[in-house]
Amino acid sequence: MIAHRNLGLVAAAATLLAAAPLSAIFERWTWLVQAVIAVAAVAAAAALARLGRTPLWAQILAMVAGLALALTWLFPSGEELLAVLPTPATFGHFAELLSNSVDDMRSHGVKVPDTDPLLFITVLGVGGVAVLVDVLCVGLRRPALAGLPMLAIYSVPVAVYVDSVPPLPFAIGAAGFLWLLVTDNVDRVRRFGRRFTGDGRDVDVWEASPLAAAGRRLAVVGLALAVLVPLAVPGMTSGLMNNFNSGVGNGLGGQGFGGSPGRVDLFAALSGTLNQSETTDLVKVTTTEEDPFYLRFGVADELRGDGFRVRGPNGRQVTGELPDPSAQPIQGVERTRHEATVEVTRALAMPLLPVYAEPVDFTDLNRSWFYDQDLQVVFSNRENSREKSYSFDYVRSTFTPQALRSARQLAADAPLRVQQTVTPDVPEVRALVAELIRGKRTEYDKVRAIYDYFSEENGFTYQLSTEQGTSGQEILDFLENKAGYCQQYAAALAWMVRDAGIPARVAFGFTNGNRRTGDTLTLTNRNLHAWTEVYFDQIGWVPFDATPTYGVPGSARSAWAPDVDAPEENTPQTDATDTPDADDPSAGPDAGPNQFEEGDDPTVGAAPGTPTQQAPRWPWLLAVGVLALLTLLAVPALRRLALRHRRGRPAPVIRTVDASEASATGEHRPAVTVGADPDRARADAHAAWDELLDTLVDYRIRVDRTETPRATADRLVREALDPETGAGSAARLLGRAEERARYARDPLTGEPLPAALRTVRGALAERADRRTRLMATVLPPSVLQRWRTTVADASSRLVNSGGQVRHRLLRFSPRRLIANRMSR
C-alpha cells in the first residue's frame, strides 16, 4: 500500500504540473491555488480509501466526494452545512456557475480575469483530470493512458491563446508525465524484489541499467527537441489557431477578415479585399435614414511603433439592454433614432458585424454576439458574419461646430486621454503639428487645423501609386510625398491629432457607395473604407474623413468636417456627397504592398502608424541560418588547424657558454654551444606522432594502437607511401623520433619533424580521392571521433555518478532501516 500511496501522490503532482499551461490564459494565479486545494482533496480521499482496501469503484466515489467537498468550500452558495457539506442549493449554484462560465468565455479574451464561473470550471476540470489520472495510474496500472487527460488540459490554452503558448509550461507538464512513468516503473520493479547483475552484485532499484539509461536519455532529448525546435524554426512560433485564423490573403472570408475579434488585422484585411480585380457584393443595408453616415465594423485604437493595432473588444450581449445616447441631450448635438436591416452575403465572413454607430437595440441575433460600447463594435468569439441577417435601431448624432468648439479638454490623468494620445517619437511630425495648431485655443480648432492641412491646396492628392520615401519613417514619407489612400489619410490624421494631445483612432467600414435602390444600399468590396474618429468630452467620438472625396465613392461630409477641397461657398452641409465614378475604389488594384511605398499592394502596411506589411523576414532568417550552419561546420576544421599549429611549433634551443675555451683563446667573445631541451624535444616528438596518427585517421588509413612506432611507420611506408621517396623517409623519421622519446634515455634532437609531417601529409593527400580530401579538410574524422569519445565518456561518468549518489542516499532511507531492523 505504501507504493500505491506514493504513486497516487505522484499522480496528483503530475496533474498539477500538466496544468501549468493554463497560466497563459489567466491574469493571476488564483486558479492554481484553488486547483492545488482540489487536487489535494482528491489525493487525500484516494489515500484514505486505499487504506481500507476498498475496491476500485469505492475509490472513485471517494475521490469524487473529495472533489465535491473542495468545490463546496471554494465556491460556496451560502447554504452549506458546516461550510463544506453541499446541499441541493449548492449544486444549483454550481449549475449557475457553469452556465455563466459559457457567457464569460464568450465575452472575455485572454488573458481572462479571475471570475468565479471561469475559476469554477477550471478547478472542476483539473480536479476531474486528477481523478482520471489516479484511476488510470493506480487503479488500472496504465500510466501511459494518463497522458490523454493531461494532454486535454494542455489543449485548452493551445486552442484559445492568441499568441504562442509559452514553451516552459509545456516542458513542466511533460516533466510531470515523465515523472509519473518513471515512478510507475520503479514500483513495478520493486514488486519483483531485489535485482542482481550477472556477477551476483546487488543492484539498487534506482540504479540505471543500460536499457533504462538509454530510454531516459531518449526521453530527455525528445522533450528538449519538442520545446526548442518550434523556437528555432521560422514560422513555428505562432499559436495553433493562428495558423487558420489570421493572414492577409487575397480573398474574402476567413483569409481576409477571419480570426478572433482581437486579432483581425483590419488594415491587411481591407487591403486583401480592395485588391481583388472583381467587384463583389458584401452587404445590403436598408435604413430609414435618408443620408446615413458610414456603416462601420471595426476600430484600431492602439498605436505602436509599427502602426495602429486592433485591441480585443469586451462588452455585453446584444440581446440585453444597450445604452441609449439620446437619453442625455447636449446643446448643439442633434440625435435622431432610425432603423436598419443588414444582410451580409456569403462573401464576407468575419467575427464582426457591420452596424451604424451607436446601436441601441438588436433583433435576430443570439447570445453569441456582444457589443463593446467603447469601440462601438459588435463581435463574437464563436460565430462569424457570413449570411447573417439582422435588424437594429441606432441613434444618429450630428454636431455643430459651435458645440464641438465648446467641448472642454479632458483632464490630463483621464484614462482615455492617457491611452489614446500616446504616439511614437517622431520629432518632425510633432514639429509640424505644433506649427499647425499654434494659436488654436479649443480642441476642435486644433483638429480642424490638422484636418484642413490634408487639402489639395497643400499638395495632397489621391493616387493609385505612391513613391517610396527616403526618411525611414513611413509617416514622414507620406507627409513628404503627399499622395496615398484612405488608410494613409485616416491613420496620419489620427496620429497627428494624438500628437496634439487629443484622443483619436481609426475606424473601418463601408461608404454609402452609389448603388441605391429605394432605401436599400448595396455595398461591395470597392466601398470598404477607413476614416478617423476624434473624442470630445461629454460628446463622444466624432468622425473626420480626410481622404479626398474624388477618391472615395459614396464619401460623406458634414458641417463639422467639410470637404476642404471644395470652394468655400459650396461647402456641403449635408452628410453625403456621391461621386460619379463608381469604379474608382478607395484603394485600387494597382497599389503597392505598403501604403507609403511603391509595389503591388496599395493598402497592406497602411498609413503612418498603421500595421505595415514589411518585407518578408525569411530571406534574412535563411541567411542567418545558413551562416550559422557554415560556422558550425567550420568548427571541426578550425579545431584541426589549431591542433596542427600547436603541434608544429619548433622546440626552443639552449645557449651555453664555454668559459674555458674563451679564456684559452684570449678572445673577449665567449664561445656559445647551441642545443635542444631534452624534455621539450621529447614533447615535440609525442606531438608530431599524435599529429601523424590524426592524419592517418583523416585519410582513412588504419591505425593500430598496439603497434610500436617503428612498426606503424614501416606499415605506413609499405601500404600508403613510396619507400624510395622523401615521404617514406619522413614517416620513418617520425617513427624513430617517437620510439626514442618513449624508450631511450635521450630523445632524438635536431630533426625537422614539422617538415616531415608536411611531407607525409602531402603524400597521403595525393594518394587519397577527392571526397576523402574534402572530408579531411572540412570535417576531419579525427576531431569528430575525439568529440564522440569525449561525449560518451562524460555521459558514462554522469550516469555512474548519479547512480552512486542515489545508492548512497538510499542507504539512509528510513524504509531500508526499518526493513533491516525487522529482519533482525
Image: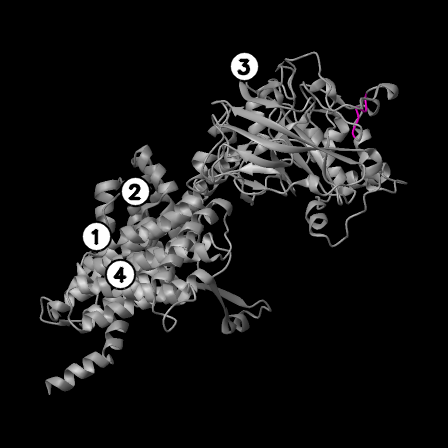
Q: Which mark is residue 180?
A: 4
Question: Residue tagged by mark 3?
Answer: 278
Marked residue nearer the N-terminal end (2 or 3): 3
Tell me if residue 388 comes above or below residue 232 in the rendering: above
Q: Is residue 216 above or below residue 276?
A: below
- Residue 70 image point, x, y percent: 35, 66
Give the amino acid at mark 1. Asp
- Relative side of 132 to 346, left or right: left
First in residue order: circle 2 vs circle 1: 2
Would residue 235 appear left or right of 792 to someone viewing this image? right
In magenta, the rendered stretch is 561-565
> Residue at 17% across / 73% down in the picture?
52
- The image position of residue 581, as x and y in percent, is 68, 12
Q: CA distance from mark 2 to mark 4?
A: 49 Å
Q: Mark 2 touching mark 3, by CB under 8 A?
A: no
- Residue, x 30% and y 66% (percent of image)? 66
Q: Give the distance between the C-alpha atoms of the residues marked 2 and 1, in whole angstroms.
A: 15 Å
In terms of secondary structure, where does tag 4 sit? helix
Q: Quadrant of residue 710?
A: bottom left
Which residue is at 31% across, 54% downward? 150
Judge the density around disc 4: few (<14), some (14-19), many (≥20) Cα neighbours within 10 Å.
many
Question: Residue beneath label 1, please?
Answer: 704
Name the amino acid, label 4.
Answer: Leu
Q: Which residue is mark 2?
A: 699
Mark 2 or 4, nearer chain start: 4
Q: CA distance from mark 1 to mark 3?
A: 77 Å
| Main secondary-structure element of the magenta-colored stretch | loop
